[in-house]
Every structure is written in C-alpha cells, then in structure tokens.
Image: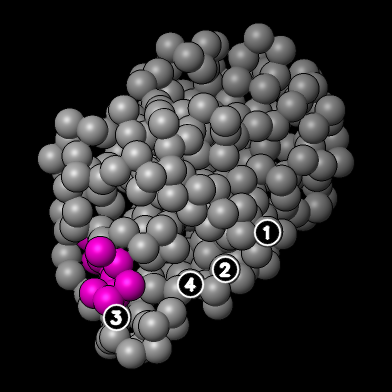
C-alpha cells in the first residue's frame, strides 16, 4: 500500500491541475472499496481546483466548498495523460478531465476509493487521524506521552494511524532501524530519549523517501509513470539473511508481526 512518501509524491506530481477548471468526471467502473456516487460529482463540472493537498495517505482536490478525496488503497495509481488521448487501460475507474489534461485513477484490486466530501474533519476516513509525522506537532514529547501506557510493539504503534499518520510497514521498519530500536519492544518501555530519536528518524526517513520519489516494490508508480527510487536506499526492509549495512556482521532477521513482515538487526536494534 502506498505510504506517506508515495502519496506526497503523487500530490506534488499533479500540482499542474491546480487552478485548472474541471470540465467533467467520467466514471467507468464505480465499484471500488466504496461505490463511487457518480451523481454527487456532477455539480463540480466547470469549477476550478483551488488547491491539491494531502492528509495522511489521502489526496484532496479542493474545489469550491467541496473536496474530492482519493485513497490509493493497495494498488491504486494516478496517471496523467493528454486531454485528447483515448487510451484506456484495464482497471481505469475514474477519469478527471481538466482544461489542459486528464488525471486517471486506476486500481486493479479495487481497495482504493473516491469520495466527494464537505468537511474533512468530520469525514469517517479522516476524523480520527493522528498528527502528520513531518509536522511540529509530532515530536518525541508527544510520542512519549501518547504511548507510555501502551503494551503494543513499537512497530505496530507507529503504524496505528490514530497515533501518527502515513507510516506503513516499509517505513516503520526503516524508521526503527535508523533509531536503533527493536520493532518488538513494547511501547511503554521506551524512554523519552528513545521517543525523541524515533520521531527524528521518522522525519529523516520520510523526507529522504519523498526526495527519492517514494518506493516502488510492486504497484506504486508516480503519476508521470516513473518509479520511486527509495527502494535502492532501503536499509533493512526486505533484506532478510543479508548482512546488516550498519554493523557489517549480523544477518538481518525476518519475523512476522500482526501478519506483516518485520526486518531488524539483533545487534544494532535493542
């Protein structure tokens, strides 16, 4: 599933549609995770996109008093094409036609979604989200007080969107390796100093991933068709049985946590 860097990369890539008029929305297949309400979008035709933003793993096209909320799900991607192009790809679900181009939402596994919303603070997908990891609100002090009573493993805690948004399995592994914290540690055992390090590592790793265009492992591509190249910089994720790049001695171990693969170095992460 695309995580914060992949979604942020997508948001940056489609900024060309800011201040453009949305001429029409074509819905070829409304059957996503939640069925797309075609009629609800009709009143947006002819209006301008005021800004394109991100909240957690969601893309928001702000139009008048409404917002189009896009969630890429497991395999969703956005594709920019020429306005005159009639090229259709299998699993194209929604086509946003602008005055100077088209933005197409494609999703083979259909776990993504497209909604028309009024108030992002009250929408059921957004209302209970935690702070953005790159914001000042997310810091060691916040994290320490938020999780000091939690018995959940710290990796699970970082992936809980109520604690902090946008961090999924890949980046949770990378963040904890950078912070030298073992993913299986119970959250309440972490000191304030360790929480400060985790928050600092989160900002560092996510910024690096955004600069690299995200991580392409299976399904993620940028809207312009390019791959994300942070995969070449992954320090621990998907490196089971390889030597640790830090200590150069220990072999990276792979375990399962909550049905997700976890990778760590027993020597470097305590």
- Which residue position holds label 2? 230
Q: In this view, does 4 lie above or below 62?
A: below
The answer for how far apart the CA atoms under marks 2 and 4 are is 7 Å
Instruction: From the top left corner, tell me how far across and down residue 81 is, in percent.
Output: 75, 54
First in sequence: mark 4 or mark 3?
4
Q: Residue 176: where, in percent of width, then height?
A: 37, 58
Q: What label sits on residue 211 in the rendered view?
A: 1
**Left or right position of 235 against 144:** right
Task: Please indicate whether residue 118 sits to the left or right of residue 150 in the image.
Answer: right
Q: At which x and y percent is residue 11? A: 66, 43
Quadrant of the rendered structure where residue 254 is?
A: bottom left
Magenta-highlighted residues: 260-270
Q: Are marks 2 and 4 in contact (CB under 8 Å)?
A: yes
Instruction: Decide which of 176, 37 is in the foreground and name it.
Output: 176
Identity of the residue drawn at 26% across and 34% down = 147
**Disc number lying in front (3 or 2):** 3
Work out which quarter of the rendered image holds the N terminus and state it. bottom left
* Element assignment for label 1: helix
- Please identify, in this view, whether the residue under mark 4 or under mark 3 is nearer the observer: 3
Please give the residue where the numbered disc 4 appears in the rendered image: 234
| Residue 111 appears in the figure | no
The numbered dot on residue 117 is none
- The span from disc 3 to disc 2 (Cα, nearest Å) is 19 Å
- Which residue lies at the image location 58% right of the left edge and 26% below the top edge? 68
Give the alpha-carbon distance from disc 1 to disc 4, as whole Å.
Answer: 14 Å
């Amino acid at each position: 599933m695309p995580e914060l860097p992949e979604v942020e990369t997508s948001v940056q890539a489609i900024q060309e549609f800011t201040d453009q008029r949305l001429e029409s929305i074509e819905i070829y297949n409304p059957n996503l995770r939640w069925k797309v309400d075609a009629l609800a979008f009709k009143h947006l035709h002819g209006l301008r996109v005021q800004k394109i933003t991100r909240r957690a793993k969601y893309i928001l096209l702000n139009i008048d008093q409404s917002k189009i909320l896009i969630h890429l799900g497991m395999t969703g991607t956005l594709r920019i094409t020429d306005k005159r192009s009639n090229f259709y790809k299998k699993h194209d679900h929604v086509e946003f036609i602008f005055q100077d181009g088209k933005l197409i939402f494609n999703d083979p596994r259909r776990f993504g979604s497209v909604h028309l919303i009024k108030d992002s603070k009250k929408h059921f997908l957004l209302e209970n989200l935690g702070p953005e990891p790159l914001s000042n609100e997310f810091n060691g002090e916040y994290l320490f007080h938020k999780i000091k009573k939690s018995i959940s493993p710290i990796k699970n805690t970082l992936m809980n969107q109520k604690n902090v948004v946008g961090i999924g399995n890949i980046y949770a592994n990378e963040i904890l390796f950078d912070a030298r914290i073992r993913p299986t540690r119970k959250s309440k055992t972490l000191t304030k100093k360790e929480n400060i390090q985790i928050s600092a590592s989160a900002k560092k790793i996510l910024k690096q991933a955004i600069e690299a265009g995200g991580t392409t492992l299976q399904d993620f591509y940028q809207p312009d068709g390019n791959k994300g190249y942070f995969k070449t910089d992954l320090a621990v994720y998907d490196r089971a049985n390889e030597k640790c790049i830090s200590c150069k001695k220990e072999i990276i171990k792979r375990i399962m946590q909550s049905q997700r693969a976890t990778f760590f170095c027993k020597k470097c992460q305590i």
